[in-house]
Image (spheres, rainbow, N blue to C red):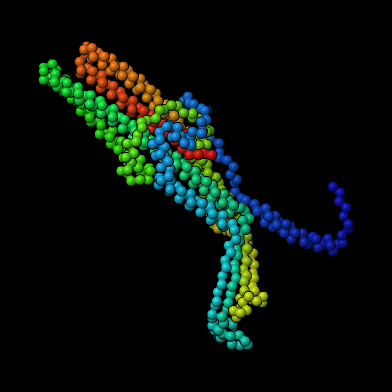
Amino acid sequence: MNLTRSPASANDTGTREAAKPFRILTVGLACVLQAACTVGPDYREPPPVDTGDGWSLPVVTGSGMEDYAKWWSTLGDPTLDYLVDAALAENLDLYMAAARIEEARAVRDGVAGARAPVVEANASVNRRRQSANGSLPIASIPGMERTQTIHDVGFDAAWELDLFGGNRRALEGANARLHAAGIEAEGVRMRIVAEVARTWFTAVGAGDEVRALEAAVEAQRHSLQLVQLRHAAGDASLAEVDAVQARVAAAEASLPDIRARERAAGLALAVLLGEPPERGLALLKDAAGLPVLTGIPVGERADVLRRRPDVLVAERQLAAATADIGVAMAELFPKLSISVGGGFQALDAGDLFNSDSGRFGILPLISWRVFDGGRVRAEIRAREAAQWKAALAYEQAVLAALADAEKAMGDYRFGLISLERHQASLEASQRSYDHAARRYAAGTITMVELLAAQRQLHEAQAAVTRAHTSAAVQLGALYKALGGGWDVS
């Protein structure tokens, strides 16, 4: 590009050359003030983690995410719906999580407030008497009185310009920690839902098992009575009586443990609902039975990681740790602060707000930590190490989440298989009992043999109940492992 310029005089050229360094300094300072660079690494996304090639077990891979937020409502148990709603409304852990959110929000607001100027208003009346023999020769100054009353009204403002982004990085970190606190609260919600479901399934299953075993015990008592009658008539040996009596005692001995399990679950339910423990016992009267269990859509591994609160919290903590590096690095650079003060000052209160009583001052100040024994750089290294640790914690959270999901899927899958086989055993026991009942009616077997078939049937029912309870508990654990129980959107 060709530019046509008019010739300049030597005097003008010298003036421009002399002013050149000042222009460079002025332009550089203006660029710094306007651009205000931000030091430290920018956080964009977490480091990649090898999540493998997919699930190790065959699963239903449909998304089905609309059922994850309120998965318990798909089981058709109104009592469980009530318990979960009550726990989410009154559970004390949720209140504590809400308090942690408020604490993080207050910290974030405090960090945000540090970016704004601080303005203080002041007013004073100072009555003082000065020494006539002091450094100020008041006695020799005409019109100067030793005793004075000074009236002063004004303001002071101070503002530190965030030239290198230390405050901006601090706000980034505070926002990330606030977000993490919110996700942690949702994680508490998820755990409460899973715990309520687990405790409720345990209580319902224990109640069903007690009733099945009580029926089996009753059948065995009847068998014992018949054997005792046969022994009295000389048709049965004492060994047969003792054998039946041992089976009755063993069956009766198992009942207290199951009743204690049912009671403990009821007490735990009340605590989850934020109520005194004994009130949970009344809830057991409304049990409608264990839910029907089927396979559930799991989705891909990436879907699980997007739903897991612990993984999301670890990612937010990594973002906060990254921002902390910029906060530490900003201490390496100069700081520019501006202090402004003004107001009115007068000896006579009537002259306080006259124009001649006004005062004003402005003080720009540049400070730079030139030497500090390496403390700033040590702090930077510490923040970088903390970021590295947060990155490792994120990777560990991802792998632990996948392992948790794999275990829960395996437990539930094999729990369903166990339930299916126990149900097959129950069906066979039912057919055996029906056959025995027909033979007894035909007079081909004795009552003792019929009662033995009945006892076997009741024991099979109790085994099905135990397997059903275990699978239902595993279902709750699976939904928790998959990140169900809170609205990920």
| Residue 77 can be seen, yes or no | yes
| Residue 481 can be seen, yes or no | no
Q: Is residue 84 above or below residue 138?
A: above
Q: Residue furthest front?
A: 441
| The C terminus lies in quadrant | top right
Q: Is residue 60 above or below residue 89?
A: above
Residue 128 quadrant = bottom right
Q: Residue at x 54, y 49 (%)?
A: 175
In the rendered picture of this protein, how many numbered marks are placed on residues? 0
| Residue 84 at x, y percent in the picture | 41, 39
| Residue 94 at x, y percent in the picture | 43, 46
| Residue 482 at x, y percent in the picture | 47, 34
Q: Residue at x 84, y 47 (%)?
A: 1
Task: Choose between 200 and 297: the one closer to the eye.
Answer: 200
Task: Choose between 166 and 243: the one closer to the eye.
Answer: 243
Task: Choose between 238 and 87: the one closer to the eye.
Answer: 87
Residue 7 quadrant = bottom right
Q: Residue at x 58, y 85 (%)?
A: 145
Q: Residue at x 56, y 57 (%)?
A: 113
Q: Please indicate whether residue 305 sits to the left or right of residue 365 in the image.
A: left
Q: Please indicate whether residue 405 sits to the left or right of residue 237 in the image.
A: right
| Residue 209 at x, y percent in the picture | 30, 29
